[in-house]
Image: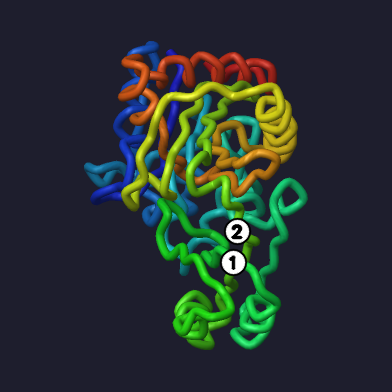
Amino acid sequence: MKRIAFLTAPGESANDNRERLPAAFQAAGWRVAVLFHETLGLTADGVAARDAGGRAVPLAPFDLVWILGLGARETFLDRMQLLKTLDQARFVNTADALVYLHGKFDLAEFGPETHASADVDTLMEIVARGGRWVAKPTAGSFGRDVFLLGADDIHCRAVFEHLTGRGAGRYCLLQRYVEQAEHDEKRVIVAGGQIVGAYAKTGGNLATGAAARSTELDATETALVRKVVAHLHSRGARFAGIDLAAPYVLEANVANPGGLGTLEQLAGVNPAPAVVEVLVRDSSRLHKPLS
């Protein structure tokens, strides 16, 4: 029987991936282990993490490993270096994908005018050039700390001080505002190099109150998504949520993208089994199963 390990965090989550995805793999006949980020360590049996019962579980024997979320900022790089010692072909999203793709820099060529800096004065100078800008963390999720700013906004400096950690050296991303995104942004869920589903959203991120509706991608949007999917897949990201307002890609979330629950609500069909199917098929092309 094939085995998959999910690395996640305890407590509440902004989406149901850590319940929905393990359940889908279990229904497909896989043995499932749910382990926790901050328990990851190097043991006599190799890289291991603990389950809810406190048992240390080595990761090397698993056919697939799926990292859900980033875990604590303070331990992130150490944990990714530990995971990098394992066979990356067995990861849904590799350690490199989490390190290099979630920071929103990698897709700048597909997006609107984009800047990033940890210096408040530099960010102020960019906004002062005119127009409207979206300011957000470089590695944020769930629509947290996203601000729409203009040169006349009295809160600009306070926003940038907050996003840069008030001198702590955190980077802020500034992206030229795309008006279409306000009323016709689309979230596309992709897995194993394939488009699983898409929906449109009005008013930003669903986690912060946006409304979702059913949609289909037109030819231009499909071509754009396929380019991004090929790019992500080549960099080790085999599951992601892509946000676009054609002709731009606004970002791609590879850490723990929401959307599966929304797709089910809109279409009445749980998309998780389809995710399992395409990932298993894609995985079989990358390596020979252990079991």
Amino acid carrying mark 1 in the image = Arg
Residue 218 place in picture, x, y as percent? 64, 23
Q: Residues within 10 Å of mark 2 (few under 14, many from 20)?
A: many
In this view, the residue in front, 189 or 180, is 180
Q: Counting residues from the N terminus, which is met first, the one under dot 2 or under dot 1?
A: 1
Amino acid carrying mark 2 in the image = Tyr
In the image, residue 270 above or below residue 78: above
In this view, the residue in front, 78 or 162, is 162
Residue 200 place in picture, x, y as percent? 47, 33
Residue at 68% x, 38% y is 232
In the image, residue 12 above or below residue 93: below
Mark 2–mark 1 CB contact (< 8 Å): yes
**Residue 84 visible in the shown view:** no
Colour setup of the view: rainbow
Residue underneath mark 1:
132
Residue 60 place in picture, x, y as percent? 53, 35
In the image, residue 160 above or below residue 103: below
Residue at 57% x, 34% y is 91
Q: Quadrant of residue 72?
A: bottom left
Q: Quadrant of residue 272?
A: top left
SS type, badge 2? loop
46 to the left or right of 95: left
**Residue 10 visible in the shown view:** yes
Residue at far right of view: 109
Residue 224 place in picture, x, y as percent? 71, 33
Residue underneath mark 2:
177
SS type, badge 1? strand
Q: CA distance from mark 2 to mark 1?
A: 5 Å
150 to the left or right of 262: right
In this view, the residue in front, 199 or 34, is 199
Residue at 49% x, 79% y is 153
